[in-house]
Amino acid sequence: MSTDLIPLAVLMGLATYPFRAVPLLAPGFERLPERVRLYLRLVGPSVLAALAAVNTMVIRDAERNPVFHVGPEWLAVGLCILVVALRRSLLIGLVLAAGSIAVLRALGLATLP
């Protein structure tokens, strides 16, 4: 198991935290224009989506070169997007996506890249 991406995850958390904390810390957040509030609310999910897309579409080959990848992970991401769009719940979508991949791996239908 590689820990190469932990500093990147910490950096992304620090980069997105101010946007996520604005509603909690800024007085009068509800008085901001609706467009600004929508933007600030979508920063965190958009970063999460970008990370999921990269981890789903790109894997490393034996020489550590990035390679385009199509696999069962795409189904899990599609399931997550569908659930989030229909239920408006990111948590339920993520749990179902992670659970579906865990089941597929347990059945031997999906392998770790």
Image (cartoon, rainbow, N blue to C red):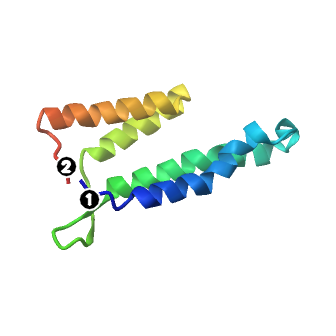
Query: x%, y% of residue 42?
Result: 63, 46
Query: Left or right: where does residue 15 sit relative to residue 102?
Result: right
Kind of residue indicated by mark 1: His
Query: Left or right: where does residue 89 sit relative to residue 37?
Result: left
The number of numbered badges drawn on the structure is 2
Secondary structure under tag 1 reads: loop
Per the image, the residue denoted by label 2 is 112
Foreground tag (1 vs 2): 2
Per the image, the residue denoted by label 1 is 69
Query: x%, y% of residue 78?
Result: 38, 41
Res 99 → quadrant: top left
Task: Give the Cα distance between marks 1 and 2.
Answer: 12 Å
Res 20 → quadrant: top right
Query: How dense is the environment of label 2, judged by Cα within 10 Å: few (below 14), some, or many (20 and up)?
Result: few
Kind of residue indicated by mark 2: Leu
Say which of 94 and 78 sits in front. 94
Query: How dense is the environment of label 1, judged by Cα within 10 Å: few (below 14), some, or many (20 and up)?
Result: some
Point 68% across, 51% down: residue: 18
Point 42% across, 36% down: residue: 80
Query: x%, y% of residue 2?
Result: 27, 57
Query: Left or right: where does residue 37 sit relative to residue 96?
Result: right
Point 40% across, 56% down: residue: 6
Are the residues flagged by discs 1 and 2 in contact, CB closer than 8 Å? Answer: no
Point 76% across, 43% down: residue: 37
Tell me: residue 12, above or below residue 64: above
Query: Left or right: where does residue 55 sit relative to residue 85?
Result: left
